[in-house]
């Protein structure tokens, strides 16, 4: 889970369209002097509000802001990010050596998660102009009940950003049909 920044946390917090379900994201990591992009996708959100369900008087009123307890500031939104793979970031900023295996490195508490630009999403998902989604089973497992919807959202995003190549579109169609069929089967609705 990652915390979604608010106005008080940074100059420009992410907008709603930058943190949708199925939104590709990345984290920059430097390992042994080489810079990598750890690629992920948003699959869940949680709203954290310590005040929810509390009743009774509060320590501060509107005219007594100096007595506002710290827990009021603990309201936040958390986004679940499934890690899809890694790629080496070249000196030109382009991705090289993309792999859809689980990243070998753990992330740090202070790592920043960025909205993944379309060109990075395309580069991560294509090898020799062919689409690649080798992380699919892992993503479905991690995302659980929301897995099929997250995969379909990611596929729809890929349809928009990939070149209009019939073979890639056919692969996306087959993957989408397979994921939706498996979801219906698991729910018992064939």
Image (cartoon, helix red, strand yellow):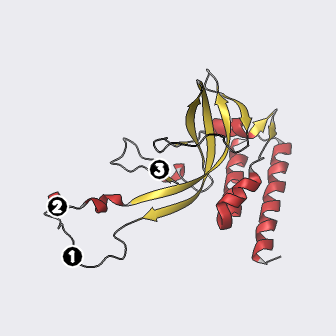
Q: Is residue 48 left or right of residue 39?
A: left
Q: In this view, does 188 lie above or below 177?
A: below
Mark 1 residue element: loop
x%, y% of residue 143? 65, 60
Instruction: Evaluate whether residue 152 shows in this view.
Output: no
Residue 177 or 50: which is nearer the viewer? 50
Residue 58 or 42: which is nearer the viewer? 58
Residue plotted at (79% across, 51% down): 172
Q: Across the whole image, how many numbered discs are drawn on residues?
A: 3
Q: Is residue 127 above or below residue 1?
A: above
Q: Is residue 41 left or right of residue 10?
A: right
Labels 3 and 1: the sequence-earlier one? 3
Label 3 or label 1, whichever lies nearer to me, is 1
Q: Which mark is residue 15?
A: 3
Task: Indicate the quadrant where residue 152 lies.
Answer: bottom right
Q: Name the residue under label 1.
A: 57
Q: Distance between the residues labelled 2 and 3?
A: 31 Å
Residue plotted at (70% across, 55% down): 139
The outermost residue toward the top is 91
Contact, CB < 8 Å: mark 1 with mark 2?
no
Task: Indicate the quadrant where residue 37 lies.
Answer: top right
Density class for disc 1 (Cα within 10 Å; few <14, some 14-19, many ≥20) is few
Q: Which mark is residue 67?
A: 2
x%, y% of residue 146? 65, 65
Q: How far apart are marks 3 and 1 (CA)?
A: 34 Å
Labels 1 and 2: the sequence-earlier one? 1
Label 2 or label 3, whichever lies nearer to me, is 2
Quarter containing the C terminus:
bottom right
x%, y% of residue 30? 56, 30
Labels 2 and 3: the sequence-earlier one? 3
């Amino acid at each position: 889970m990652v915390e979604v920044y608010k106005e008080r946390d940074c100059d420009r917090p992410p907008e709603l369209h930058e943190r949708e379900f199925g939104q590709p994201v990345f984290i920059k990591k430097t390992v042994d002097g080489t810079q990598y992009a750890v690629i992920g996708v948003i699959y869940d959100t949680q709203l954290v509000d310590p005040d929810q369900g509390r009743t009774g008087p509060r320590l501060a009123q509107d005219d007594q802001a100096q007595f506002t307890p710290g827990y009021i500031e603990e309201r936040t939104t958390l986004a679940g990010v499934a890690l899809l793979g890694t790629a080496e970031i070249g000196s030109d900023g382009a991705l090289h050596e993309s792999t859809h295996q689980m990243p070998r490195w753990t992330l740090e508490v202070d790592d920043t998660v960025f909205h993944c630009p379309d060109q990075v999403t395309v580069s991560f998902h294509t090898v020799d102009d062919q689409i690649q989604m080798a992380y699919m089973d892992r993503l479905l497992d991690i995302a659980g009940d929301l897995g099929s919807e997250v995969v379909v959202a990611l596929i729809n995003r890929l349809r928009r950003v990939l070149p209009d190549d019939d073979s890639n579109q056919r692969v996306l169609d087959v993957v989408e049909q397979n994921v939706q069929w498996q979801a219906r089967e698991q729910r018992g609705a064939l």
